[in-house]
Amino acid sequence: MENEFSILYSKTYNSVYKKVENEIKLEIQNQYDKYAGFTTVYDLTRSEIKRKIENLQINKSDKFKPVIAWYGLRYDKKREGFECLIFEDEMQKEFQSINGIDKNFTFLKFIEEFASNNAFIDLSRSWNHFKTVYEFMYKLNDFTEFGLWNYNGNHENHPMFKKYWELIYGSKEKAQIDKKNVSIDFKIKRKYKNILGKLYDDLKSDFINTDLTSKEDFKNVLTKSSEEHKSKIYFSNFDYYSANILRKMEPIFNQLNYTNIGKSGLIFSKNKKPFTQNKLSQGISRFEKNQEQLKKYKPFIDLNSKIIKGLESIK
């Protein structure tokens, strides 16, 4: 049977969970617009949830541990078949026995913080448990069904995992289709068509294999359907640079993303192997983990600045 404390707990828990869930959704969309890699977004989100937990008054002092321990004991005893969280008189008495706490920090305030703490812990657990699903959403820039789901089973059995796996990799039946039958068009935005020649010139000295990729090849791959040409683009530098350059170019197009690049088989690494979606994602992860070292590579810094300025000049 619920009492005023269990009602307050449930109300606070649900409110905090929903609020932070929405904050995380908005923040990852914001980070996507800033071209941040998913690894960065993932770590930032975990750090923010951890910060929220640490800032709670009940986590700043060991004085509250006996109360929390009592609740944990009762929670375990009632776990099987219980329908609501019950706070009994003994828990309030345990709280009132604590010495040296602010008189304004009432038992009701404790319940609110305790509910918030548990909500944060469950949010962090869900964020970690469904990391792969959120990465799929991030790659597709599709957060319409984003949620931090309370689910204790294998994440690969969750409907959202199955849905987004198929959106990125296709079903097993589709995966067997010959890639030659797949036509890819990155759909360049009309206002950017004229900057591709300049972009090629900026890339060719340090990032493009000009022996295998002419300016015409570069334009063909990026402006035409794959059925209309036989051109290919070969990068000449490390994958983490190539992956980030392609990411920086995404705003120029409607359909330039790692999934379509992988399906096209038209853009190659320095090892003359076509980039896959997974290879590009790994490149971005490596890029994010080696920021300080990469910042020392002047050709990349100069190129990064040129791409950004090129986009801004056409807005």
Image (cartoon, rainbow, N blue to C red):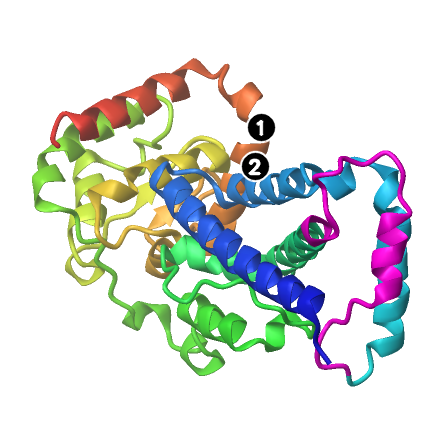
- Going by the image, does 81 lie left or right of 17? right
Give the spatial CA distance, label 2 vs label 1. 6 Å
The mark found on residue 286 in the picture is 2
x and y, in percent, of residue 259 in the image? 39, 58
* Helix, strand or loop status at disc 1: loop
x and y, in percent, of residue 59 in the image? 77, 41
Query: What are the residue bounds of the magenta stretch?
Result: 82-110
> Is residue 72 visible to the viewer in this orientation of the structure?
no
Q: Are marks 2 and 1 in contact (CB under 8 Å)?
A: yes
In this view, 103 is above or below 83 = above
The mark found on residue 233 in the picture is none
Q: Hey, which quadrant is residue 171 in on the image?
A: bottom left
* Helix, strand or loop status at disc 2: helix
Number of numbered discs: 2
Q: Amino acid at mark 2?
A: Arg
Q: Hey, which quadrant is residue 127 in on the image?
A: bottom right
Residue that numbered label 1 is attached to: 290
Q: Amino acid at mark 1?
A: Asn
Task: Examine the structure image and report whether residue 84 is included in the region drawn in magenta.
Answer: yes
